Each structure stands twice: as C-alpha cells, then as structure tokens.
C-alpha cells in the first residue's frame, strides 16, 4: 500500500494529521491535471488551476472512503467536473439568459474549448451516458475534466490502454450524437 493510500484511508477515518500530510503529496498532481484542463478554458476566467484544485480538494476531504490513490483521483475528476459545470451554469444564467444553441463536437481526441452552453450540454449528455455505461463515462471524466492521458486514465480505471482507447472512441462518438440530439 502506498503512502498516499495509507494517508487517504487514515484521513477518511478522521485523522486530521493524515489529511494535512496528504495535501502536499497529491497537490502537484492535482495542480498539473487542473492546469491541463484550464488550458482549454476561455481566457479571462476568474477560476485558475490553483483555485480549481483548492475547490476540488475541499470537496474531497471529509468522510469519503477512498480505497486507494486511483479512487481518489477518479473522485477528484468528478469534483472538478462539478465545479466547472456549476460555474458554466451560473455564467449561462447571468450572461445568456438561459438560452442555448446546439453545437457539434469535433471528433478530436483531446479536450477542446467549450463555451458555458456547450459544457452544460456535455454534462447533460454525460449524465445520460453514465446511466448506460458507467466505466466509459468515468473514462470521459478522467480524460476531459482532469486532462489525464489515455494511459493514465486506463491505469486509474484498472483497464488496459487498448481497452481505454476503444472506450474513448465509443464514448466520444456517443456524446457527439447525444449533443447533436441524435441519441
């Protein structure tokens, strides 16, 4: 069991010292993932990678039972997703009057820049996709919302890179169709 895994288990049991020791060990990796994700955001954002990591970390500490390092980073991906989608919804309400238009996703395999409307549409499609195929949806969250490489996401999910590649291609195609209203 790694130091991170041991500290995660102790922190979820309420050990404040373990929680304090955990942050320096996971901070750099969370910061790198957040920076990769924020690089595709529109310029002029008030939320930067550091703020995203801090908000996500606040959601991560507490009484969750993390089983290991990979589980922690999967939960971190979901926390970052929730933060970004909540911000997009708030921007949509404030600036756009709630209107939305359909926009096609490109077939690119790397994360792309989404407007607030696009991000909300992606979140809605991803929520539906999670009900159909939770593993593939988790892969999308890791790849898109944390910017993990295919290999890193595969390791976090405990699947081979080839399987991750097939799942990524399928998930991307499904989400494109869902966002275009074809699914």
Image: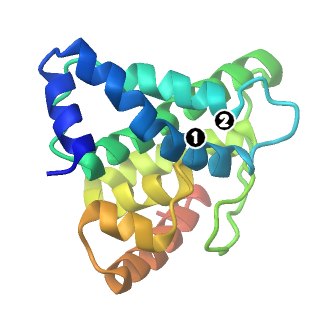
Q: CA distance from mark 1 to mark 2?
A: 6 Å
In the rendered view, does 46 fall on the left or right side of 135? Answer: right
Image quadrant where residue 98 sits: top right
Q: Do the CB atoms of the residues marked 1 and 2 lie less than 8 Å apart? A: yes
State which tag comes first along the sequence, 1 or 2: 1
User: Element under label 1?
Assistant: helix
Q: Position of residue 97 (x, y in %)?
A: 77, 20
Residue located beneath label 1 in the image: 31
Q: What x and y, as percent, mark residue 153?
A: 40, 64
Name above or below for residue 164 compared with residue 155: below
Please give the name of the residue rendered at 33% of the width and 26% of the height, measured from the top-left corner.
21
- The color scheme shown is rainbow
Is residue 133 visible to the viewer in this orientation of the structure? no
The residue at 56%/25% (across/down) is 86
Q: Is residue 95 visible?
A: yes
Residue at the far right in the pictured view: 44
Quarter of image, res 12: top left
Pinpoint residue 44: horizontal percent, then vertical percent: 88, 31
Q: Could you say which is closer to the camera, residue 108 or residue 97?
A: 108
Q: Residues within 10 Å of mark 2 (few under 14, many from 20)?
A: some
Q: Is residue 49 above or below residue 64?
A: below
């Amino acid at each position: 069991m790694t130091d991170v895994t041991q500290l995660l288990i102790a922190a979820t049991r309420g050990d404040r010292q373990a929680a304090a020791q955990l942050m320096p060990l996971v901070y750099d990796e969370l910061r790198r993932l957040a920076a990769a994700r924020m690089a595709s955001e529109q310029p002029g954002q008030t939320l930067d990678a550091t703020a995203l990591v801090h908000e996500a970390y606040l959601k991560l500490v507490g009484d969750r039972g993390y089983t290991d390092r990979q589980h922690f980073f999967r939960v971190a991906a979901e926390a970052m997703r929730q933060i970004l989608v909540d911000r997009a919804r708030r921007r949509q309400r404030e600036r756009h009057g709630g209107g939305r238009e359909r926009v096609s996703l490109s077939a690119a395999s790397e994360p792309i820049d989404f407007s607030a409307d696009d991000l909300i549409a992606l979140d809605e499609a991803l929520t539906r996709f999670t009900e159909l195929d939770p593993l593939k949806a988790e892969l999308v969250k890791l790849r898109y919302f944390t910017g993990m490489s295919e290999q890193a996401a595969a390791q976090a999910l405990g699947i081979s890179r080839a399987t991750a590649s097939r799942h990524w291609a399928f998930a991307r195609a499904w989400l494109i169709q869902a966002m275009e209203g074809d699914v």
